[in-house]
Amino acid sequence: MSVKKQLFEQLAKMAQAIASPQRLELLDYLAQAERSVDELSELSGMSVANTSKHLQVLKQNALVQMRKSGNQRLYLLAGDEVVTLISSLRNSAEAHIVEVDTLINSYFMEKDQLEAINTDQLLELSQNDEIVLLDVRPEKEYQQGHIPSAMNIPPDDLSRRLTELESLDDKTIIVAYCRGPYCLYAHDAVRVLQAKGLNAHRLEEGFPEWKAAGLPVQSNKVLLN
């Protein structure tokens, strides 16, 4: 067998490893933070045994890694390239598969009304002091990594902290981001903030895409990039 065919065989094995909605969902959770099997089982709704089997397939195909922390085994993505791989898959599906486009339009019915901005626009706005970045993911995910200067307001805390945001200057632009393009947290937050008359927008991409692009990330008060 030629080297080229051997290479294609290895690529096919990796492709087979992600050819599962359950494993794609696990990768999505791991793109936010490292997690134990029990955590992933609870998030995905799968049994612990089934979750473990899927993780082993991902690990055998170099998509995730495992590290020990005390008595726990924690799983994490093998690298930011995995995020890029899934993003490319998503972009191709959105561009060429009608069913995917239909699902997105029905799922995010109001997405076009939420004035989304992309990463380049956010970087330009970041030069302006009148911008507030809002990370609306759960606290654990925020603690393991977030865009520098972003404040964390998880979905359950938004109503309690609305007064804090309403006190901002009228010129302040609020940009909310969450787990990725298919995450509803940012959509919901922006709808609430806009209903209060605030100049709120959502980031088209999520934190994993930001990190995979090599942009600065802060974790535990340490700048990682």
Image: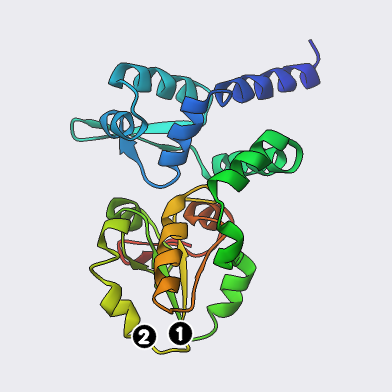
Compared with 203, 209 (above or below) is above
Task: Place residue 67 in its image quadrant.
Answer: top left
Residue 216 appears left or right of 45: right
**Residue at horizontal 36 percent and vertical 55 percent from the top:** 137
Q: How many marks?
A: 2
Q: Which residue matches tag 1?
A: 172
Compared with 200, 146 (above or below) is above
**Residue at horizontal 26 percent and vertical 71 percent from the top:** 161
Closer to us: 178 or 149:
178
Q: Are marks 1 and 2 in contact (CB under 8 Å)?
A: yes
Q: Quadrant of the N terminus?
A: top right
SS of the residue under disc 1? loop
Q: Which residue matches tag 2?
A: 168
Name of the residue lying farthest toward the left:
71
SS of the residue under disc 2? loop
Task: Find the distance from the CA under tag 1 to the CA under tag 2.
Answer: 6 Å
Compared with 38, 82 (above or below) is below
Residue 194 appears left or right of 94: left
Amino acid of disc 2: Leu
